[in-house]
Image (cartoon, rainbow, N blue to C red):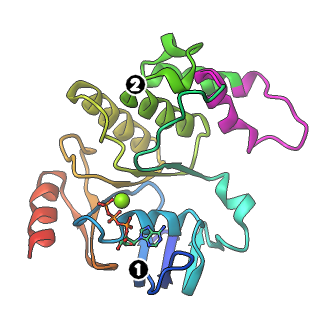
Amino acid sequence: MSEAIVRLTNVTTTYEGAAHPVIHDINLAVNPGEFVIVGGPNGAGKTTLLETIAGLLPVVNGSVEICGEDILKKKNKLRKKLGYVIQNFDFDAYTPFTVEEVLIMARFGLLGLFKRPGEEDHAAVDTALSTLGIADLRKSHIGKLSGGQQQKVLIAHNLAKKPEILLLDEPFSNLDLATREHVCDVLCRIADLGVTIIIVSHAFDALPKRDVRVVVMKSGEIVLNKITPPECVQQIVRLTSES
Ligand SMILES: Nc1ncnc2c1ncn2[C@@H]1O[C@H](COP(=O)(O)OP(=O)(O)OP(=O)(O)O)[C@@H](O)[C@H]1O
Ligand SMILES: [Mg+2]
């Protein structure tokens, strides 16, 4: 068995000021290149799980390791390996950046201090723009775009970072059917290239043509963690979420 790229051991996390921990005693190991679907009802703790993996929440108990290192101890180093498409993000209408600038920002974290983006960085931006089919929006102001267009920019921003692990929280929520299918295909291709994908989603129409790991959460706990053929994912998430 290969070394897990994401490993949560007995993890309990909470939000600042919250009366109780939100996720409890979570154990999860994800191998490099796995495609993980996280399901479960509203309020189950799915977003909290992704925030925990991304090192955004204090860990009350247990440990969160990315590539074998503690995310909270090696934040700067490990966050370079992570892309995170957050749930329901929208840019203020007056955000003074173009789409191109939003994507190039994804590269700044990978550059050293005071280094300017070079050829490789601009190439990564171009590839991400064309992968999402938004090259024509390159000079548009991000705040003036529709919700679905902004969502595509956010996904492209994370692809431009070329992460080893891509976390996506309901990335299809603003997208029309054709775009959803297109983004699903993009994610499958990325997964086939070896990127580890952890996605919170209720859209199971396009999955990689290989087994995926299904994780179902309820009341802050993982109630199912099972390697599943793609054709069974929808049914197994429904059954576990409802029971
Ligand atoms: N910033 C916060 N401070 C305190 N509690 C929070 C905060 N954000 C979420 N919670 C609580 O944590 C629990 C889990 O929330 P979370 O957002 O992880 O659920 P979810 O499974 O992603 O739900 P949804 O499907 O609605 O997105 C909920 O009970 C919620 O009220
Ligand atoms: Mg959520």
Say if disc 1 is inside 8 Å of ligand 1. Answer: yes
Say if disc 2 is inside 8 Å of ligand 1. Answer: no
Taking the image as drawn, is residue 128 in sight? no
Q: Residue at x 46, y 44 (%)?
A: 89
Three-letter code, disc 2: Ser
**In front here: 232 or 159?**
159
Residue 221 is situated, as x and y percent measured from the top left of the image, at: 32, 81
Examine the rendered structure and indicate whether residue 182 appears above or below residue 137: below
Q: Which residue is mark 2?
A: 146
Nearer the camera: disc 1 or disc 2: 2
Where's the N terminus, which quadrant?
bottom left
Residue 193 appears left or right of 161 = left
Examine the rendered structure and indicate whether residue 231 appears above or below residue 225: above
* Residues drawn in magenta: 97-121
Q: Residue furthest top?
A: 136
Residue 26 is situated, as x and y percent measured from the top left of the image, at: 41, 82
Three-letter code, disc 1: Ile
Q: Quadrant of residue 191?
A: top left
Residue 82 is situated, as x and y percent measured from the top left of the image, at: 58, 53
Q: Residue at x 50, y 21 (%)?
A: 144
Q: Quadrant of residue 206?
A: top left
Q: How many residues crowd around disc 1 within 10 Å: few (fewer than 14), some, or many (20 or more)? A: many
Residue 51 is situated, as x and y percent measured from the top left of the image, at: 50, 64
Indicate the quadrant of ligand 2 in the picture: bottom left
Question: Of the numbered discs in the image, which one, if any, rests on residue 23?
Answer: 1
